[in-house]
Structures are given as structure tokens and as C-alpha cells.
């Protein structure tokens, strides 16, 4: 009637967009489809950058790494059931890695789903998401959108960051309400990730343990990189004089070439240290759970800085738990590390440095080999120089050998520039991470990919070309998984780990208007990457690696179960 004409209305579509914009969301990563196609269009029209991918897992990975890079939740938008499930892998991975992310999925009609009457893409998405993320919410009323978005943001970034699922049934989008009341219902989150100050007694305990050390070591994890407390962390290292290790994604928090870096003496410092301070790093499988051969026989004391109290004592006893956010904890420690702080014993420092210099010298000639076909070391030697010359570029890295060797060989110089497979060692993050890294930072991106790893997200080269992103992908092409030389003893099909021989991945890029280059020597590789990074054009370089180069599972072959039964 007449009343309705006079009353200004808003609806679910607009309220979600307004709620996201009010909270500073600038970018959505997603894949369009029912019931969120129009939502994507309207978000774009409202000035949110909506990046459309070819598969939800890659959009989800993009959102997750956007969260890591910015400390704001990355937003991923998917359709119902299958699209949701594709995105869910990335949400679970984000949660595992402590990256803040919100997966928003459209879903089918509650009435039909709950009675299991067989709706289009019917699935109880909320129930499925719940065990795989930090929090999961469903919104049934337009008037609740404001508070739901606020809650999702807070849940994602406060405390230990992680993934949040927001379930939006199709009907919600077109639900209307009074525009004024709608505007009032929006919530701008205040102090989404409050500082968490450590207790003074815990700070003192940690300082006492650290001071008592004869062979101290600090280990930085990606939590320390995420925290963006870069200056405090540098001061802690330099004022204490303690050698440090950086976990894979923490590399560059301090330059890997820093005089106190023990990166190249890793096995020595893990074995021989007597006090280890963990900063935003978990004692999980990547650190051999803090025990066993890797850690040597000498008694060891652990100090751990983490925002998550439950992380303490997860694998071994933590004698000095320091619970709080890393910025606050490190600042508190710094107050106790003044001019009177004793430098670590000189014999420890000289042992560490001698081992490090010896290992670096041993590696050097292998990195300079200009052979064809290339081996991993020769090719990575060239890329190492690229990053040295372009320290603000972002390095994305996945694969088995390609990952393990690049991690050791390519020095990083600035914080949050190395993005890789993380806690799960998952393959498939490559193109999603590359897209988001380019969009969030505006910096050039170098994605160093095993040929197998690339396959999990390879179709996103179209996305990279479509948005004309400054991404240079280098594929270490050794014709297969781990190596390209396995044979099927029965003949017939090729071995399970072998791909098409002499494949030309560079031509995929050309199909979408990007630049494709095929290279066979480290010199050619260096030239091609330089050209790509100078031009900023989307480029894919097919780097031909010796199919016999590479080892089973890279450095983690020990995780493969072995059969003791040999069938004759
Ligand atoms: P890595 O794999 O590099 O060793 P992990 O992912 O295992 O790193 O560990 C990161 C740790 O950092 C997690 O335990 C997480 O709770 C913690 N963390 C994340 N952000 C912060 C922060 N702002 N302050 C303190 N701890 C944090
Ligand atoms: Mg390979």
C-alpha cells in the first residue's frame, strides 16, 4: 500500500555489504553462483573489490593469506554445498595456521534442509563447518546481519586467530527491513584484537630462565611475523645477543643474513642449546615435538610466548610460559633486557657461527652450477639472487623438493615476504596465495612451484592474467611428483608419480594473454624472472629440471610408512 511506498527499505544484500564496508573490508575473494551471484555484483558496484576465482579452494587460500598479511580477516565468498566444501578446506587450513579468515557461504532453505526434503544443493553447512573452524554462525534475520558480521570479525582476529564460518541462507539476501532500522543495526567492531598483556610474574620468570642460559636460542614462528611487532623483535634479538632461528614463514622477520641468524646451523643449535625461547612457534611436527634425536640429550628448558594459553605444555614441559600477544610480551621482556644484560657465553656464539659459516661455504658452489638440465640447487641459486636484489618481492613457495630446498637456499630480508605450505605442509596454496599477495601488498610476487604442487591451483593462471597481476610463476618441471623417473613394473600406465614428459606449462599462460617462457639453464631463468618482474606482466616460466633430480617426499621422507612385506 501507500505506507510501503513511503517507507524506505533495505535488504539482506545491502546490509551485508554495508556491514562489511563499515568494518573496513575492501576485498572479497570468491566464486560466483547461486545464491550469491547478485551479491557479488552488488558488492562490486558498492566499491568492494570482488576477485572471482575458478575454484573456491583457491579463493579461500587467498582470503586466508590476506588475513595473515593484514591482521584483518580475509573474506571468502562461496555458493552452497560443493562450493562451500571447496572453500572449507581453505578455512580449516587457515584455522590450523592461525590465519584470520571468514568464509561466507550461501545455503539452501532451512525448512527444506532440516526436513531433508532434497533442496538444490541441500546440506547442513553450519554443522559441517563447526568442528573445522574457530566459530560458526548462521543468520536468519536481516536485523541480525550487523551483529553477526561484527561477531565473525572479532572471533577471527582476537586471541589466537583463525577461521570463522558465516552461513547465509538464500532467503536472507532478499529479506527486507526498514532502511533506518537497518542502518542502526550495523556494528563497527571496536578493538577487534585487544592487546593481551602478560603477567609481570610470568615476565620475570621468563627473564630469569633466559638469563641463566649458557647456550640460549630464540625460535621465531609465523605467529611472530603475523604480530607485526617487527621493531620490538629486532630489539629483543640485538639487545640480548642471542642466536635465533626463523621458522619457514618467519624467515625475513630479521634478515636471514643477520649476524645472529643460526639458520644454517639449525641442527647444531637445536641439539646443543640449553634454553630455548619460542616466539609464536608451536612445538609441533615441524620442530619434532620438542624431543627426540633432533633436540639432543642435554637437558633443555623451554620458554614460550604465545597468545593461546592451551598451547603451553602441548608436547614438552614449558618452564616459563608467557601468555599474551607477542608485541606486549616482547616489549615487557625488553624492559628487563637493559645495559646490564649479560651477553651469551662467547664459546656458544663462536660454535654457532663456525658451524653456520661452514655450512654456508659447503653449499655455495652448488648454487653457482650453470648446468642444463638444471638441478634444484642451480636453479634456486639464480632465484636466491633475484630475492637478494628485490627484497620487497613476495615469495610464494610450494612443492616437495622445491619447497624444502628453496626454504634453505633463498634468504629472506623483510618480514612477511615468504608465504608457503604452512603447518599442514599442504599443496595447492600457490596461486591463491600469489593472487592475494599481489592484491593486498601491491608488490611483485614470485611463485616458486613444483610441477606437481602447481597442478592443484594451476587454472588460476587465468585469474592472474584477467586481473593483470604482477605475478611471476616459476615451475620447477622435473616431470613428476618428487621425480619424473619412476617406472611401472608391469608396463602399461606410467608410474603413479610421473606426468607427461617435457610438458610446456608456459603455454598455459600464453593461452590467457600472459607471458610464457621456457628455460633450461640458471642464467636463462634469472634473465626471464628479471624481465617478468621489471615488466610486472603476468608470467609463467617453465624451468626444465633434471627428471632424476629430487628425493622422495623432499625432506620428510621419514613420514612415509614402509612396508616390511615384499611380495615376490
Ligand atoms: P610456525 O609454523 O612458524 O612454527 P605456528 O603456526 O606453529 O608457527 O605457531 C604460531 C603460533 O603463534 C600459534 O601458536 C599462535 O597461537 C601464535 N600467535 C599468533 N598470533 C599471535 C600473536 N599476535 N601474539 C602471540 N601469539 C600469536
Ligand atoms: Mg616435480
Image (cartoon, rainbow, N blue to C red):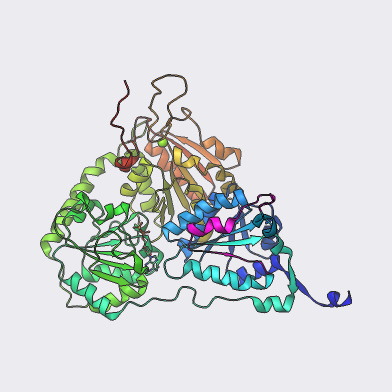
Task: Farthest residue to the right: give it.
Answer: 2
In the foreground, 65 or 119: 119
Rendering coords of residue 505 (x, y %): 51, 36
Rendering coords of residue 460 (x, y %): 56, 45
Task: Classify 45 as above or below 200.
Answer: above
Rendering coords of residue 282 (x, y %): 33, 60
Does residue 435 appear in this view? no
Who's the residue at 69% across and 64% down the image?
172
Residue 119 on the magenta segment: yes
Rendering coords of residue 452 (x, y %): 45, 38
Which quarter of the figure is the C terminus placed in? top left
Which quarter of the figure is the N terminus placed in? bottom right
Q: Quadrant of residue 187?
A: bottom right
Who's the residue at 29% across and 41% down the image?
558
Who's the residue at 45% across and 24% down the image?
494
Compared across the picture, whether 501 is left or right of 557 comes to right
Ligand 2, image quadrant it occupies: top left
Compared across the picture, whether 202 is left or right of 175 comes to left
In the foreground, 272 or 458: 272
Residue 407 on the magenta segment: no
Who's the residue at 53% across and 57% down the image?
129
Amino acid at each position: 500500500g501507500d505506507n510501503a511506498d513511503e517507507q524506505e527499505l533495505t535488504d539482506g544484500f545491502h546490509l551485508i555489504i554495508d556491514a562489511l564496508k563499515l568494518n573496513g573490508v575492501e576485498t572479497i575473494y570468491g566464486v560466483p553462483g547461486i545464491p550469491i551471484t547478485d551479491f557479488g555484483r552488488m558488492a562490486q558496484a558498492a566499491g568492494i573489490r570482488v576477485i572471482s576465482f575458478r575454484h573456491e579452494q583457491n579463493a579461500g587460500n587467498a582470503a586466508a593469506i590476506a588475513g595473515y598479511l593484514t591482521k584483518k580477516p580475509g573474506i571468502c565468498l562461496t555458493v552452497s554445498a560443493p562450493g562451500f566444501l571447496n572453500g572449507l578446506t581453505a578455512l580449516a587450513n587457515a584455522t590450523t595456521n592461525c590465519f584470520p579468515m571468514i568464509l561466507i557461504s550461501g545455503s539452501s532453505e532451512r525448512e527444506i534442509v532440516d526436513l531433508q526434503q532434497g533442496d538444490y544443493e541441500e546440506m547442513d553447512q553450519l554443522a559441517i563447518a563447526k568442528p573445522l573452524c574457530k566459530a560458526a554462525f548462521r543468520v536468519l534475520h536481516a536485523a541480525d546481519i550487523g551483529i553477526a558480521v561484527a561477531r565473525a570479525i572479532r572471533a577471527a582476529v582476537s586471541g589466537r586467530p583463525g577461521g570463522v564460518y558465516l552461513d547465509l541462507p538464500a532467503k536472507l539476501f532478499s529479506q527486507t527491513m526498514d532502511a533506518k532500522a537497518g542502518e542502526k543495526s550495523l556494528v563497527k567492531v571496536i578493538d577487534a584484537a585487544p592487546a593481551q598483556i602478560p603477567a609481570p610474574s610470568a615476565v620475570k620468570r621468563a627473564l630469569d630462565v633466559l638469563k641463566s642460559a649458557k647456550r640460549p636460542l630464540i625460535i621465531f614462528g609465523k605467529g611472530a611475523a603475523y604480530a607485526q611487532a617487527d621493531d620490538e623483535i629486532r630489539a629483543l634479538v640485538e639487545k640480548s645477543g642471542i642466536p635465533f632461528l626463523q621458522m619457514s614463514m618467519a624467515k625475513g622477520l630479521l634478515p636471514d643474513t643477520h649476524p645472529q641468524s643460526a639458520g644454517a646451523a639449525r641442527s647444531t643449535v637445536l641439539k646443543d642449546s640449553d634454553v630455548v625461547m619460542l616466539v609464536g612457534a608451536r612445538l609441533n611436527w615441524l620442530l619434532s615435538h620438542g624431543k627426540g634425536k633432533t633436540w639432543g640429550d642435554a637437558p633443555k628448558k623451554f620458554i614460550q610466548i604465545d597468545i593461546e594459553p592451551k598451547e603451553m605444555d602441548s608436547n614438552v614441559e614449558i618452564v616459563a610460559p608467557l601468555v599474551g600477544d607477542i608485541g606486549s610480551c616482547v616489549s615487557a621482556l625488553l624492559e628487563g633486557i637493559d645495559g646490564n644484560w649479560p651477553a651469551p657465553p662467547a664459546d656458544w656464539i663462536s660454535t654457532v657461527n663456525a658451524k653456520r659459516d661452514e655450512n654456508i661455504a659447503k653449499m655455495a658452489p652448488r648454487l653457482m652450477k650453470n648446468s642444463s638440465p638444471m638441478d634444484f640447487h642451480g636453479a634456486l641459486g639464480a632465484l636466491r639472487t633475484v630475492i637478494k636484489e628485490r627484497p620487497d618481492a613476495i615469495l610464494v613457495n610450494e612443492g616437495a623438493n622445491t619447497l624444502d630446498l628453496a626454504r634453505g637456499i633463498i634468504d629472506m630480508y623483510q618480514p612477511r615476504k615468504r608465504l608457503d605450505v604452512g603447518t599442514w605442509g599442504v599443496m595447492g596454496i600457490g596461486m591463491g596465495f600469489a593472487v592475494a599477495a599481489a592484491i593486498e601488498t601491491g608488490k611483485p610476487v614470485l611463485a616458486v612451484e613444483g610441477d606437481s604442487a602447481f597442478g592443484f591451483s594451476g587454472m588460476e593462471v587465468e585469474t592472474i592474467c584477467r586481473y593483470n597481476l604482477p605475478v611471476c610463476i616459476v615451475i620447477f618441471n622435473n616431470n613428476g611428483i618428487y621425480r619424473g623417473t619412476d617406472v611401472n613394473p608391469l608396463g602399461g600406465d606410467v608410474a603413479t608419480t610421473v606426468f607427461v614428459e617435457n610438458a610446456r606449462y608456459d603455454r598455459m599462460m600464453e593461452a590467457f594473454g600472459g607471458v610464457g617462457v621456457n628455460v633450461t639453464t640458471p642464467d636463462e631463468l634469472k634473465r626471464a624472472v628479471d624481465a617478468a618482474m621489471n615488466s610486472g606482466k603476468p608470467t609463467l616460466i617453465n624451468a626444465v629440471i633434471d627428471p632424476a633430480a629430487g628425493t622422495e617426499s623432499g625432506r620428510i621422507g621419514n613420514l612415509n610408512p614402509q612396508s616390511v612385506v615384499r611380495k615376490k
